[in-house]
Image: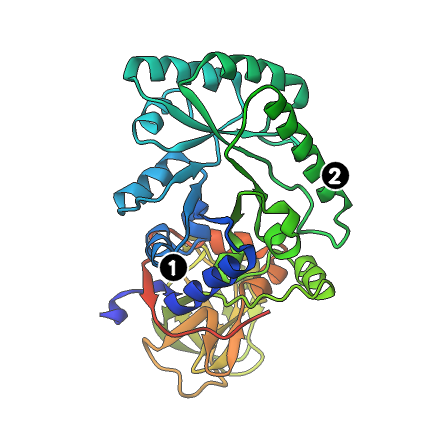
Amino acid sequence: MRKERLSWVEIDKEAFSSNISEFKRRVGGVKLCLVVKANAYGHGISPAMEIAEESGVDWFSVATLDEAEALRRNGSKKPILILGYVTVRQLPVAVRHGYHLTVFNIETLNRLISICRKTRKKACIHLKLETGTYRHGIREEDLPSFIEILKEHSELIVEGASMHFANIEDTTDHTYAMNQLARFIHLVKCLERAGIHPRIRHTACTAAAILFSRTYFDMVRVGIGAYGYWPSRETFVSARERKSRINLLPILNWKTIIAQIKEVPAGGAIGYGGTYKTTRPSKIAILPLGYFDGYDRRLSNAAHVLIHGKRAPVRGRICMNVMMADVTDIPEAHLEDEVVLIGRQGGEVITAEQLAGIAGTINYEILSRINPELPRLIVGNRASSIK
């Protein structure tokens, strides 16, 4: 049955549960919110939800209403926080299903009031406070207008207050992040002085959860770390300097198969544009996936895949649905043998960080761009820690 799949993603249940336990231990009694936006960072929203619920997460957060609906369709009973923008036409659905809404527009508040009056329901909102990221968020000068509306309308329940750090991952100097944190505390006090008391204050992403317990408040939102990846090299260095120990186990293995092995003479031009010419008689494995599946075109002639636990260099340009790898030095390679694009095979490993370095991007992008249509399979074997 496995050979009927041309490419698939395996999710290591034990490793995922271990990562969640690591963060639960670290944050103590603070609520743990697992971020499952972008198809759970490419890992699959359904398997991520299933394993996370068994592992005891308290909340889920998503970017869109559609993602919230996907969680409910898959049976989640946990509170769901929508972090991104919900259009005014979508708001009735969000209220009807009891999703928690991140609010940063007056127009959203006014529309929610109308919906709540018509449906006789209340809306749970989390105010996103602008502290220096300058994306979604309520500026301090606009806060009085929000307060005035909120004090007059009991159907709007201010369940939470949040912010997002702009520069906590990409540096070992956390001055800006701490200034943002101070700004958040100030803005929450402004709310409280006006009689608005958010029950759940949350600021911490993965990097903050690893480095600064003062960012925890009432809930932490853990994304990339729960899936076993460090947000950045700088976060890893900062954690080591602070002796902040946490063991993260990458949970994803991305695999395909060999669809053909072709003999190519010396001087043969491989793929579109002939960007690679063989320097000896070679055996080229044709792999049935490409950039449509999420394997970045920038990895052409630069990355490796694993076959029989050995590294096989990618040759030629990544195509839409096909790519090529040199198996000249892997004589045991045969048709439909398993190929690892990300993950471990034998004693070798290819990490999302390695591919990101080649492509000039970050591990988040490498992972989240894996085509959502590829099957995500839950497996039980524990991964080794990769740093």
Q: Residue furthest left?
A: 1
Quadrant in which residue 9 is drawn: bottom left
Left or right side of 173 for 74: left
Q: Residue at x 54, y 28 (%)?
A: 197
Numbered badge on residue 23: none
Q: Position of residue 339 (x, y in %)?
A: 41, 73
Per the image, the residue denoted by label 2 is: 179
Q: Amino acid at mark 2?
A: Asn
The answer to whether residue 252 shows anywhere in this view is no
Q: Is residue 166 above or below residue 52?
A: above
Q: Quadrant of residue 244?
A: bottom right
Q: Secondary structure at mark 2?
A: helix
Give the residue at x 32% y 55%. 50
Is 201 on the left-hand or right-hand side of 167? left
At 71% from the left edge and 63% from the top edge, which residue is drawn? 237
Type of the residue with mark 1: Ser
Q: Residue furthest bottom?
A: 331
Q: State the scheme by which the image is colored.
A: rainbow
In the image: residue 173, left or right of residue 215: right
Residue 182 visible? The answer is: yes
Where's the C terminus, which quadrant?
Answer: bottom right
Q: Earlier in the sequence, mark 1 or mark 2?
A: 1
Residue occupying image coordinates x 39% and y 24%: 123
> Label 1: few (<14), some or many (≥20) within 10 Å?
some
- Distance of label 1 from label 2 (alpha carbons): 34 Å
Give the number of the disc on residue 55. 1
Kindly state the secondary structure of the residue where label 1 is placed: helix
Q: Nearer the viewer, residue 31 or 294?
A: 31
Q: Give above or below for 326 relative to 33.
A: below
In the image, residue 305 lies at what x, y percent? 49, 72
Q: Identify the image quadrant of the N terminus.
A: bottom left
